Amino acid sequence: MREPNIYASESLDAERESGVAPEVLDLPPWGKTTVVGAPVPRIDGHDRVGGTAVYVRDLALPGMLHCAIVRSPHAHATVRRIDTTAAAAMPGVHAIITTDSPEAKIPWVLTSQGALSQLLDPHCRYEGEEVAAVAAETPLQAADAARAVIVEYETLPTVVDYEAATLPEAPKLHPAGNQPSPSRTSQRGDVQAAFATADAVVEHTFHTPCEMHVPLEVHGSVAQWDSGQLEVWDSTQGVYAVRDSLALAFKLPLSSVRVASHYMGGGFGSKLELGKYTVIAAVLARRTGRAVKCVLTREEMMRCVGNRPANTITLKAGARKDGTLVALDATLLGAMGAYPTGATSSYLMLDLYTCPNVRVVERSVLINAGQARAFRAPGYPQAAWALEQVLDELATKLRLDPVALRLKNIPVVSQLRNGQPYTSTGLAECLRRGAEKFGWAEASKAAASAGHVKRGVGLAAGMWGSPGAPSATAIIKLYADGSVNINSGAADIGTGTKTVFAQVAAEELSVKVERVRVEYADTATTQYAPSSGGSQTILVNTPAVRAAAADVKAQLLALAADELKKDVATLSVKDGSIVIAGEDRMVPFSSLRSLAQRQQLVGVGRRAPHPPGKVALPFAAHFAEVEVNTRTGAVRVIRYVAAQDSGRVMNALTFENQVLGGVTMGIGFGLTEQRVLDRQTGKLANGSWHDYKIPTAMDFPTDFQCVAVDLQDQECNSVGAKGLGEPATIPAAAAIANAVCDAIGRRIYDAPITPASIVNALSRAGGR
Ligand code: MOS
């Protein structure tokens, strides 16, 4: 219910204020590992693809009812009257709540000025906003009854064009106007003076589309009450975040709310916070004394539970002859949707390259559309789209190679974080190794093809600005038979988190991955973990897992030393056994009498704080080759190299999967995805997978290589990993845009690059 904001500037503040210094068992960095880093298949892979994994939608509790939500068909309206008489009399209906119900007043969108809305708000600010909900015996009965609820609306003027929403005559969504927060300016140096010293200056305005998250698994929850305590199964990236917001909504102590998220089919940021569907399920469950399931349809998901906000970015950049950047001046405008949330990020402009003179002005406006939410690297692909295209054009103007131009401006410290050095900086290495793998030098010099199908190559770089939360706890149990149980509250949102956790414990305790079970994402039974977002899951939680395993190992060796009458310093673990220095025999853990007596050893691990005075962040450089059909405007990405500095590769398979997924999303952002809202009515015009095109395997380049740049970071944390999910998508669309420009000799400033935009660009004078 409270908006988490993981946009860079806010997470910087949170990091400064947190000051958490958990007690830790600080472990020395790993050297070479055997299990960690190996391409271990997901431990739950068969369940996920075989259909036996139980997702929220599959869950069936005894007596469970089903919920359907009544939503405003208008993008802007007030509810005059709701009549539930007919609906309440329909078969199977157990409860109906509306804007008139007391529970409707549960506050929503909490800000320092108070709540901006409520659970069922009679002022509907976008198409799909919730006004009533029904609980019935079956999903169809619930849907039928929801359709029978009569709602009279008074429609209001609508604005969905975010540039128009800034104008004084625009319809207002909230009394304070459509720009609830003042513009924010970030500045260093003297931009104007610096542009006067530049040998080349480039300035363009870019538009990026609103994208919808569309994770495979739709959003949904099952709720039930047990002796006044609330139990919820949710498809969420963060069980603790949802628990905290539920406790607030129902005025319960944290201990009276249990949230569990078992199998999870993706979120990409849209499942970081409490959803109204969860609270509605809980309210209806309390009214009926039954469990209630509320699972959204694909169309409801597309309208109501988040999106990547559209941006307009004007960027001016200046450089000297040798490619040294002297100034960047940017304005960013983001579309928040109907309620305030972060909608832009200037992190890349401020920190990706060394530049002494930077000014960025950011503002966000409200429109009559579903609220934006964090979406895989919030704001970064938008910023990269502008920055990386402008840099390419600077390179063209200065007759420099675009790789060389970027290498000229590699930062040695974080300019945005008081000049703190990085624990490791792989940006240059990503550019060099990526270029080498791609064959950039030859490919970028290749002459234009003679036919109507043109080839081109392009690159773009990126970084991700969040170092992750400061703390996490994990517990590990070693059982008498030498098998292992990991207990962590982290959600595995589909990335392979559980598998990597098992590898970490297996590595530290020298047991087989198959002997490790992972218990996870349940606030009642598992340890605190921050939400699986911000590319932090592995780098925040696995140091805690490793510390817990080390704690167990220390206890085990002490027991063994006692039982075997050896000096503990002579003992170590290998293949599930105790090894004694200088002796051939190995003593399996399961044959230790002292372990059999205890039945289990329990180790607790906490993550060490971030390294003081330094910053650990991941970097990337992507290289794309495209084919553009100049007759049809069709663009195909035919070859791709993604070089990622994310520190240690924890699992070669899941690592490549993440990068593949990130590039796939970048192809969507660059070439096909855009939410279309009707300007007159504000209604969603492409709310289905038929009309909203996400890339599939058919659109992915067959020639794809992922280059892991591992600088063996000894300082970032005890496992040496720096985060991957988001950096893998940040530069992708920009790299494709640069390749398209190389192919057709025209730059296209607005994403996505559609066949129509290719044809339009080619009709401008001056191209190939
Ligand atoms: Mo992400 S946008 O931190 O799930």
Image: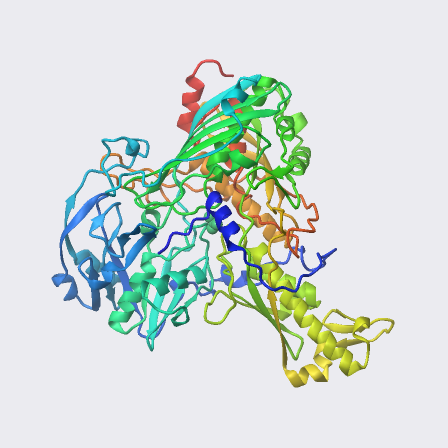
**Residue 599 pos. (x, y %):** 63, 82
**Residue 345 pos. (x, y %):** 46, 39
Could you tell me which quadrant the N terminus lies in? bottom left
Q: What number of labels is visible?
A: 0
Vertical relation: 633 (above or below) 622: above
- Quadrant for residue 182, please give it: top left
- Quadrant for residue 472, please give it: bottom right
61 and 15: which is toward the camera: 15
**Residue pictured at 59% horizontal, 45% vertical:** 617
* In-image side of 752 versus 278 (left or right): right
- Determine if residue 566 is in view: yes
- Quadrant for residue 591, please give it: bottom right
Q: Name, please, the residue furthest toward the right.
A: 582
**Residue pictured at 57% horizontal, 29% vertical:** 356
Vertical relation: 496 (above or below) 209: below
**Residue 688 pos. (x, y %):** 34, 45
